Amino acid sequence: MKNSFKIVLASGFLMLSLNSCKQSDLNLKPTNDATADVVYATPAGYKNSLVKLYATYALTSPSGSDNSDVGGLNAGFADFLRLFWTSQELSTDEAICAWGDTGIPELDYSIPSVDNQFLRGLYSRAILQITFVNEFLRESTPEKLASRGITGADATNIQRYRAEARFLRAYQYWVLMDAFGNPPFVTEANEIGKVAPQQITRAALFNYVESELKAIEPDLAEPRTNEYGRADKGADWALLARIYLNANVYSGTAKYTEAITYSTKVINAGYALKANYMDLFRADNNLNNPETILSINYDGVNGTNYGGTTFIVNAAINGDMNPTSFGVPNGGWGGNRTRQNLPALFPDPNGTLDKRGVFFGAKTGIDDIGVFTDGLRVTKFKNVSSTGVTPPSLNGTFSSLDFPIFRLAEQYLIYGEAVLRGGTGGTVAQALTYVNALRTRAYGNASGNVSALTTDFFLDERGRELYWEAHRRTDLIRYGKYTDASYLWPFKGGVKAGTGLPTFRNLYPLPTADLIANPNLKQNTGY
């Protein structure tokens, strides 16, 4: 069902058996069962190593879903997307979880502790991928290739692999910058294991991520020409547009003009909206999909773990909701649902008018966090194809639905918000055209189209278009509403009616274990 790179991605992680990396090991070299000269002896070895870098997104260990290559974290919690999604959604108005696992109630209340295991896991997972990328870059220099007799077209291909690896590292440094602000910082240029990593400021990290994304652009594939699931220039521009939209938060300097420039590059690069919004979140979303720019790829048989879209689908349903219709006949974990703020963004809670808003249940409000039926369930993601076919699924639980990291719709919304915030190089008329393209798709006609735009409109429209796609915490912070008492949601701050939060909570804390291990790190203010 999935194309070749996706299948290789599922199996390639197991071929490369790199051992785990502790959170304080950012400047250490991963240990291989085979030496680097064996692993990187051939062009195929470099391709397999590239697969490993992508697989770090989608799997939890080199040895299956029951193991974690992030020390001290249950394997079921160790997938990147599960950790990232949890950090972006549970602490906001879009999601709440009924489970009492250590660390989840804190996130439900938007007041995580310094030892929150899910945030520690996200931090460690990002650092793990950065560590793997650094090692790949050390082993793929022109000098290393020449010493191994790799020349010509093979060397040219590996140059592209290097650019993709640097993109993956820049993405993970964006994750750290967005969530934690001031993480440890190491590249392939640092001497291995000699000194503890230095801490970088958020503003300096913004400059680094920006410079990396610009530097690698010439070596990446043209938009929509790379293998499915691999980064290209479109992904590069999409991440630049995203960081520029949030530049005032990250660096103190607004860059809305740059956000317009790079979102426009994506928009003009040959992508198009998929005709049916819900088909973006079905198990065959890798096929005939001109909208998704880059995805995390999952396979319900060959590359399973309890995170990713397996988590997103199963945690949003229970046995009473007919799990078979969601493509997980033996699934349904009854955990995540939405708070009342999200369905309130839609004209009706059943997707009759705006077909993006798909919810299940009778009770919108939440009186008891631990009761799954308090709050409407989100039925946006299904491990079923657009034609109603359920793909093979190990134990009837695991998902083959790919998760979009970037898609064209986000770029339309970045363009419009940046224009309304005063960026130059775009027009309100063009922004309105992009917004109404999304709304025409959502309504099936022009009945939901709008005739005027405001900056605040875009926060609501991003909620309607991008909900549960791991954007919300970043969006609320950009709008000054994540901590402020002017905008509340149930149980914000641990109060049923919601309450304001101190502004230091706009950043998550650095994990205590890393502070102890690395004397160069200073905790974020307030923790």
Image: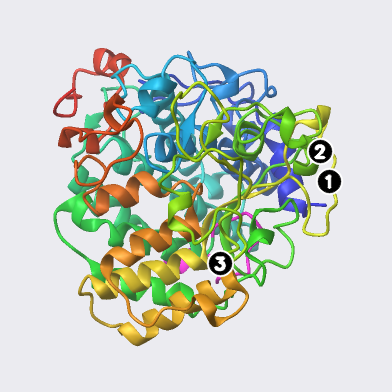
Question: Which of the marked residues, 3 or 2, is nearer the chain's N terminus?
Answer: 3
Q: Are marks 2 and 1 in contact (CB under 8 Å)?
A: yes
Residue at mark 3 to residue at mark 1: CA–CA distance: 33 Å
Look at the numbered disc 3 and give the secondary structure of its residue. loop
Residue 161 in the figure: left or right of residue 452: right
Look at the numbered disc 2 and give the secondary structure of its residue. helix
Camera-side residue: 420 or 263? 420
Question: Which of the marked residues, 2 or 1, is nearer the chain's N terminus?
Answer: 2
Q: Amino acid at mark 3?
A: Ala
Residue 466 picture location, percent across and down: 48, 56
Q: Nearer the viewer, mark 3 or mark 1?
A: 1
Residue 331 picture location, percent across and down: 74, 29
Camera-side residue: 72 or 345? 345
Residue 219 within the magenta-colored segment of the rendering: yes
Magenta stretch: give its range: 216-231
Residue 46 in the figure: left or right of residue 121: right
Q: Amino acid at mark 2?
A: Thr
